[in-house]
Amino acid sequence: MSPAQARADVIVVGAGIVGSACAHELARRGLDVLVLDDRRGGATAVGMGHLVAMDDNPAELALSAWSLELWRHLAPDLDDASAYRNCGTLWLAADDVEMAAADAKRATLAAHGLDCQLLGARALATAEPALRDGLHGALRVAGDGILYAPNAAEWLLAKGGARIIRHAAQVVQVCGNLVRLADERWLRADAVVLANGIHAADLCPDLPLRPKKGHLLITDRYPGRIHHQLVELGYVTSAHASEGTSVAFNAQPRPTGQIFLGSSRQFDTLDRRVEGPVLARMLRRALDYLPGLAGLNAIRSWTGFRAASPDGLPLLGPHPGQPGLWLAVGHEGLGVTTAPASARLLAAQLFDERPPIDPTPYQPQRFPLAQSAVPAQEARP
Amino acid sequence: MSEHYDLLIVGAGPAGMAAALAAAPSGARIALLDDNPVPGGQIWRDGPGAHLPPLARRLRDGLERHAIPVWSGTRVVAAAGPQALLLEDPTRGWRVRYDRLILCTGARERLLPFPGWTLPGVTGAGGLQALIKGGLPVAGERLVIAGSGPLLLASAATARAAGAHLLRIAEQAPLAALARFTAGLPRWPGKALQAARLFDHRYRAGSHVLEALGDDRLEGVRLWQDGSTVELACERLACGFGLVPNTQLAEALECALRDDAVAVDDWQATSRPHHYAAGECTGFGGSELALVEGAIAGHAAVGEQTQARRLFPRRQRWQRFADALARDFALDPRLKTLARPDTLVCRCEDVPYAALAGRDGWTDAKLVSRCGMGACQGRICGGAARVLFGWTPPAPRPPLSPARIETLLCLEDEA
Ligand SMILES: Cc1cc2nc3c(=O)[nH]c(=O)nc-3n(C[C@H](O)[C@H](O)[C@H](O)COP(=O)(O)OP(=O)(O)OC[C@H]3O[C@@H](n4cnc5c(N)ncnc54)[C@H](O)[C@@H]3O)c2cc1C
Ligand SMILES: Cc1cc2nc3c(=O)[nH]c(=O)nc-3n(C[C@H](O)[C@H](O)[C@H](O)COP(=O)(O)OP(=O)(O)OC[C@H]3O[C@@H](n4cnc5c(N)ncnc54)[C@H](O)[C@@H]3O)c2cc1C
């Protein structure tokens, strides 16, 4: 059986926030896109949806800052269900060392043109009275926000109108610009974009992706307790760890009045179960910062997997060994934030244009990726 | 260090009480817990408006005589390690370890959405019963009861005893099925008598609710009856469409299910060693079946196979009654079509039917609509979605019901 030409210019594998943003961008540029997703669900369905400027390295800052700008630009058109709020982030400093780190972060972000200011202990207590006494202050980043990512992904796809066709199907093999579906059909398009998160490694085993498990918990509705996304500065240390289990305080005010708590990081497990000891450690950390949470009711906890690359940056661009295959994977704990800019970077490379930021740090060829696996016999065009 | 018991029993309804009393003479260290204020479960729910039958009193007295600790107002929040549970009551959260566990978590009413079902004045059939036993005055109020199964009759009896003016019991099962069921009743002592007291001219077979009418509260109900629609003015409508086994805790403990109920063998043992289940969480069948299953589980859990086996014939008799119930009160597929596009399915999050129809499954629907994401975590709309769309919600995650964050801190130590 020879592969059928998909009735589309591009096939996108995965309808999470990244695949949806890619499809949206390609449709905006006039291409017909076929989006394949088997609805197994991914990180988009479980993540926190904090839109946050991260500056662990210049490339991360360049991508996240640009992407935040794109989200703010989309915001007025987003539907209610996407629940975008420009609540800003407070990076909390527990002591002098962290206050110095806050100041350094301020300098970095400000140099990049981001609106941010340091709050002293008193200003912090006024802004967020539920925080414990004794914190030294915080860095407020005004442009950050939150998003309900599953519905934002739906919205991005819907905005593509007739140019985006969605098909519920499992992809079991990719080979350059060919994909094989679970029903043994092969489809071909001018380009295939692999955007199926942690599962990309099933289809392309050479991708250097590791799962990083995270726990989250949500409370019942308690409106008005907190106002910003609250993150401890120690979060950066937790997010950087490459082994072991770490937790950091991260709290989000949901538009429903619920309080959404993170976060934990664990390596190399794909067990979805909530682990009591990890959850409890994470909550103890949260109580360190918000003691008033102790008596509030939690209604649910769950877990998810971030797709982590060795350098923490996503892989955006052509697969060096498989002509016709493009990668948009490895977004770790920041893919909701960086989806729109990732899509722009990918599209710019597909159209052979110069994007507003340098694409090199994100290009897949920085890793040793294998040549195309020989396509199955029947697949040869 | 957490507390330890030889045998822990969750649920103090007929099954849980019978299990505790069967196991007590063995000398095992037993504890019984339940989220209601007093033991009795759904059927013997206590309160200012309740009249407890002698059997219920005897069971309660038995628990006292054996000095079995009963933790009332206590919920299981989560599994907390290999053989341990995390519990919460109004004042504290704590961990309890056990050698053997018996799940007697019972069942809850199945509520199905129809236009107007969220109006004040509309409740579940068992729900109304519980409200009356809790002291809700209904004297002189006009009442319609609709849905399916013997619980409608029990609810009617309670409401009439409390002075409600019962206009109609609308049973969705067709007359032929009911005739078959009642013809079999004499085989089960007591049941025929119960039925005779309850059936009367207000009872209609093959009849179901179409809509609850009213603006700010219930003013009337439109029913399908004898092939046409009728409207009745009333202040109360109580609807229940059979029972759904409470399997959340069993699922959290990774016990296998069969037909949406906890799967058990002859000894009431679940698929997980040292874990037993009895009563309506293993499938509905009435309090008599729950009692005998509970006793078998209690004996089996303390190693008394002979005593357990002696009860097998009794269980079998009541199991036949349960099978007849399941067969004759099967839900009419038309009940799936009552909801309109704007009828709420999820009350916690105000999600209408139209937001769910056409989605790919429970998880997909939940993600885009927030259905099941509220405080009840899909306990109500999940049961409805199962009937309406054939969706199965995934196994529950902790907490099994809303729990204080400080309680969850006890999960830190799994030793
Ligand atoms: C606990 C946690 C907290 C997070 N918090 C944040 C945060 O606050 N801010 C932030 O920006 N990011 C956060 N993230 C990260 C963010 O959620 C992810 O980076 C992002 O959702 C990744 O999106 P994606 O589209 O690449 O992948 P996914 O969302 O995983 O989507 C992949 C899609 O592909 C489909 N699929 C997979 N395999 C196949 C196949 N073989 N065939 C067909 N379809 C397939 C799946 O069904 C799925 O829909 C968090 C992640 C986790 C786990
Ligand atoms: C709403 C309702 C009303 C009913 N009214 C009648 C009636 O009037 N007459 C009649 O003959 N039959 C009635 N039934 C049916 C009757 O309950 C059963 O036939 C039978 O008695 C079931 O006994 P059981 O012990 O299996 O369960 P139940 O009596 O349901 O007892 C289960 C107990 O476990 C508790 N529980 C469950 N999960 C947890 C947890 N995680 N933590 C702590 N506690 C937990 C529940 O609160 C409950 O008290 C009713 C059923 C329902 C659902």
Image (cartoon, rainbow, N blue to C red):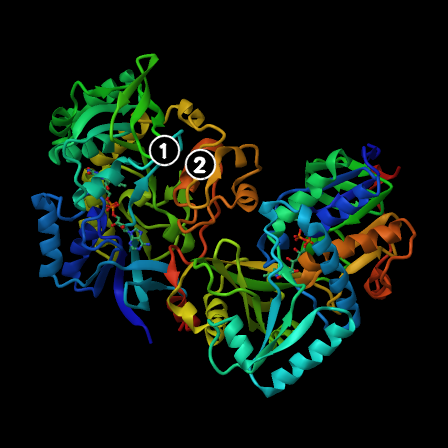
**Drawn side of residue B111 relative to residue B151, left or right:** right
Label 2 sits on a secondary structure element that is: strand
Label 1 sits on a secondary structure element that is: loop
* Number of marks in the rendered image: 2
Residue A328 in view, yes or no: no
Outermost bottom residue: A96
The quadrant in which the C terminus of chain A is found is top right
Q: Earlier in the sequence, mark 2 or mark 1?
A: 1
Q: Residue at x 17, y 36 (%)?
A: B138
Q: Which mark is residue B344?
A: 2
**Drawn side of residue B219 relative to residue A55, left or right:** left
Q: Is residue A76 above or below residue A134?
A: above
**Drawn side of residue A52 relative to residue A224, left or right:** right
Circles 2 and 1 in contact, beta carbons < 8 Å:
yes
Q: CA distance from mark 2 to mark 1?
A: 8 Å
Q: Identify which residue, B256 or A157, lies in the foreground.
A: A157
